[in-house]
Image (spheres, grey):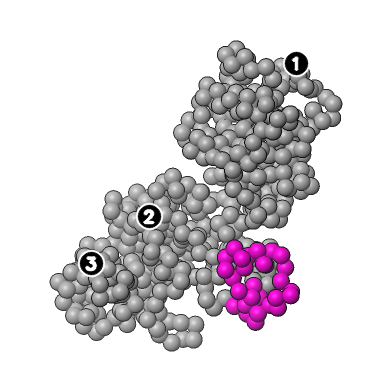
Amino acid sequence: MSGDLEELVRLGKMLEDKPELLAGKTVGLFLMESLLRVRAKDGAMYPLTANTAQLAFEERRGKWNIVLKARQMGMSTWVSGRFFLKTITQPGTLTVLVAHTQEAAEGIFRVVQRFWEHLPEELREGAARTSRSNARQIVFSALDSEFRVESAGDANVGRGLTIQNLHCSELSRWPGNAAETLRGLKAALSPEGELVMESTPNGAQGCFYEEWQAAEQAGVVRHFFPWWMESAYRSAAVREADLTEVERQLMQRYGLDQEQIAYRRTLQKQYRRMAVQEYAEDEESCFLASGDCVFDVEVLRNRLRILGEPISQRWNGQLQTWFPAVEGRKYLVAVDTAGGMSDGDYSAAQVIDIETGLQCAELQAKLGTLELAKAVAELGKEFNGALIAVERNNHGHGVLAYLDGVARYPRIYAQDGMAGWVTSAASKPMMVSRLGSVLVEQEGLFQSRRLLMECRTFVRRKDGKTGAASGSHDDCVMAMALAHAVRAEILEGGRRAGY
């Protein structure tokens, strides 16, 4: 490649093109593999050739991306290489890499420095020559471009900058107020700038978890790379006769072989409970609930693995049904209310079979009081005129008023002679405890992925109270806890509210 500036800029405008002669590769991918070198584990230098996960990222990446990955998938190196190439081919580019510690940032930056050091000589002495290079930045004066690294622990990171490429590495482990730091960096990103947030998981809470959960709604492309996408993760094969049922299911679902299963066993011996976090297998169980999770994490993980899909979804997926009403059966609709504001909590309703406790349907939506009341009334009628139990705290009063005064709904649960249920400091621990017991003893009753994911992030806080971890919701959990509390009263021969 010529070191001529005009030629470099010409290529910079073609990075996303796929000329016929490159057999489906983009110009950018071809240049990365042709120009950039990395040091392998054996100490030798090799071309930066895309592995399976890196190719998958290239195929799906958008302008803003979030990457959830197992350990050592090479994603930090790949993103750094991609952004380095953009920095040396597109004048006026500022690329910023932010890592969780200064040591980690400098480690990745050494990789970037090697990219430059192993460029063809005519590039290093021509258009890609540097005017300044240290442990935190490389400045390309002829291009008016710069690649710099920062630590997320720096209170001023990103301040006063206009960034074209932003790489947030190991976001789940950023110190301090990571959400505020990330917010400031996003504000510094130019309107056409590219963003990659990548990390291994670190608990079902915190900035990275919140970004992952909100990605789809925010227009961010989600990428998940499980450990078996790394070809080196293999051991001597497990015998066919020794495979467990869980291992057979994994092989069938993901196309794994017996050498990969053997490696998985090694991971489980070495990392024990943390294996599902450090070497992710799916997008849900890898977000290990913290040690303060109220519910049994193992039970939740096992149930999540085998959940089926609802037989119907209505109202844009807000209402999901697994078991439709059966003639002669009695049902309960339990309602956890919220205000319905777009930035607030959801309202939720759980439909269960009173005799068995089986979850039949679930509604989760941000609805105003009147809209929620109408939806609940329709749901009750659909399930054989079900008993409706509404938490009457806060917005529940409005829902109850509509059901009684407008819908004239005949079956409303009453507690101590008053319509509705009160969740108090005294009743909530009992409700949550009962739900936890049912989960352990009869996990097959629960069908909803939304519900079980909320259970994973339902934690005990420092003040002893329980609730959703930061960035999570607990409306489905509390609606189901209410359902089983009311069901227990009915079955124990207490207040039968019309039954």
Residue drawn at x 36%, y 71% as measured from the top left: 81
Residue drawn at x 65%, y 39% as measured from the top left: 323
Pair 3/2: label in front: 3
**Measured Cα–Cα span from mark 3 to mark 2:** 20 Å
In magenta segment, residue 236 = yes
- Kind of residue indicated by mark 3: Met
* Residue 129 placement (x, y as % from top left): 23, 76
Residue drawn at x 70%, y 30% as measured from the top left: 327
**Measured Cα–Cα span from mark 1 to mark 2:** 54 Å
SS of the residue under disc 1: loop
Q: Is residue 104 above or below residue 176?
A: below
* Residue 51 placement (x, y as % from top left): 44, 74
Residue drawn at x 58%, y 25% as measured from the top left: 378
Q: What stretch is highlighted in magenta?
A: 234-263
Q: Is residue 432 above or below residue 95?
A: above
Left or right position of 30 against 378: left
Q: Name the residue under label 1.
A: 417
Left or right position of 399 against 439: left
Q: Name the residue under label 3.
A: 14
* Residue 193 placement (x, y as % from top left): 30, 56
SS of the residue under disc 3: loop
Q: In this view, does 67 lie above or below 428?
A: below
Quick one: 40 or 372, which is closer to the camera?
A: 372
Task: Kindly indicate the quadrant of the structure image that contains residue 255.
Answer: bottom right
Q: How crowded is mark 1: few (under 14 residues within 10 Å), some or many (20 or more)?
A: few
Q: Residue 64 carries which label?
A: 2
- The answer to whether mark 1 and mark 3 are in CB contact below 8 A is no
Quick one: 265 or 142, which is closer to the camera?
A: 265
The quadrant the C terminus occupies is top right
In magenta segment, residue 44 = no
